[in-house]
Amino acid sequence: MAITKQIAKMILSEHARRPITGNLVMGGRQTVVPSIEEIREYMAEFGIPERETEFEIDQDTLAATGEGILDRNFFSMFTDAKFHSIDVTDYENAEIIHDMNYPLPDKFKGNFDFIFDGGVMDNIFNPAQFLMNCSELLRPGGRIIHSEVGSLWRGAYSIFSADYFLDYYALNNYEDCAVYYAQVRGNMLKTRWQLSQIQPFKDGEQDKVQKAYVSSKWPHLILAVAEKGEQSTSQKMPIQLVYRPKDDDWDTYLESCRRFARKKREPNIFGRPTRHKFDLESRLRFFFKNPVLYNRTNAKFVQNL
C-alpha cells in the first residue's frame, strides 16, 4: 500500500480545501513514493506552507526502498494532526491493533478527523465491515479518502465498483462524496492516471439514477472522498440499484446524491480548478492523444494526473 504521487496530490488537495487537523488514522502503514522535493513542489502548487519536520527513512513498510520518508513525515510536512495507523498486527509498527474484518471496540469510535484507506479493502475478507468501521471511526465533519482496486489485481480478494462507495455514503446520509475511476496505463507508480468522476444521475436529471460502469482494457483504481455529516449513519447497507426498494431509504439516497452533485467536489490535483470542455473539437483531440482509454463509461473525464 502506498502514497503515490497522485495520491499525495489528492490528499494535499483535500487539505487545501479544508485543513486536516485533529486525529488522523491510516489503514495500515503506507510507503511514500514521492521524494521530499517532489512533495514540496506539490505543496507549493496548492499554496500550502511547509512545517518543520524531522525526516526519517522508511524502514517500517514492506515496500520500503531505503530512500523514502515515513508516512507520518509526509503528513507532518503540512499538518499538526496526530498520526495513527490501524492494522491487524504490529508488523509495520501500527499504533492500533484491530482486525477490521470485525466490528470496532467502542473506545475507537468517533475519535478521528481524517482517514486514509490506501488499499486495505481488497486485502480482507469482509470489506463491508471495514467500510462501516471507518465510518464509525470518524467524527462528524471527518473525511476519508479511499484508493481501492477496480479491476483484476494480483492477489486481491475483492474488486470494487464506484457504486459500492457512492451508494454506501449516499444511503448513510453523508454530507458529501465524490467517486472517480483512475485508469492506469502501465506501472501505477510511474505513469499518469486518467481520472473520470462518476455521474449518479442520467443526463443531469436528478430523479433518474444510473449505475456507474466502465469497460476498459487498462487496469483502474476507484478513488473516493467522503465527508461525514452531523446526521450521518454507519450501519445502513445498500442493495444494488436495480433491486433496491423505493422506501424511505430511497429518498435519503436521492437527496444525498443531489447534495453531492451540488457540492461539485473535484480533485484539484494540479493546484487549480480544471474542467474538461465537452465540445466536439476538444473530445476528438483528447481521444486522438489517448486512444482506447475507455471503451464504455458514464463517468465524466476530469483530468490526467
Image (tube, grey):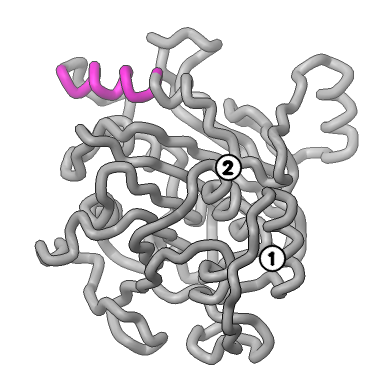
| Residue for point 50% across, 55% down | 147
Query: In x, y percent, where is residue 273?
Result: 69, 33
| Residue for point 71% across, 74% down | 35
Query: In x, y percent, where is residue 148?
Result: 48, 56
For discs 1 and 2, the disc positioned in front in the rendered view? 1
Q: Earlier in the sequence, mark 1 or mark 2?
A: 1
Element class at badge 1: helix
Q: Main secondary structure of the magenta part?
A: helix
Circle 1 packing at 10 Å, graded few (<14), some (14-19), many (20+), is: many
Q: Which residue is mark 2?
A: 181
Type of the residue with mark 1: Ile
Q: Which residues are magenta?
A: 248-258
Query: In x, y percent, where is residue 190?
Result: 75, 65
Query: In x, y percent, where is residue 230?
Result: 23, 35
* Residue 245 appears left or right of 203: left
Q: Which residue is mark 1?
A: 39
Type of the residue with mark 2: Tyr
> Can residue 130 be seen by looking at this rendering?
no
**Residue 249 highlighted magenta (yes or no):** yes
**Residue 196 highlighted magenta (yes or no):** no
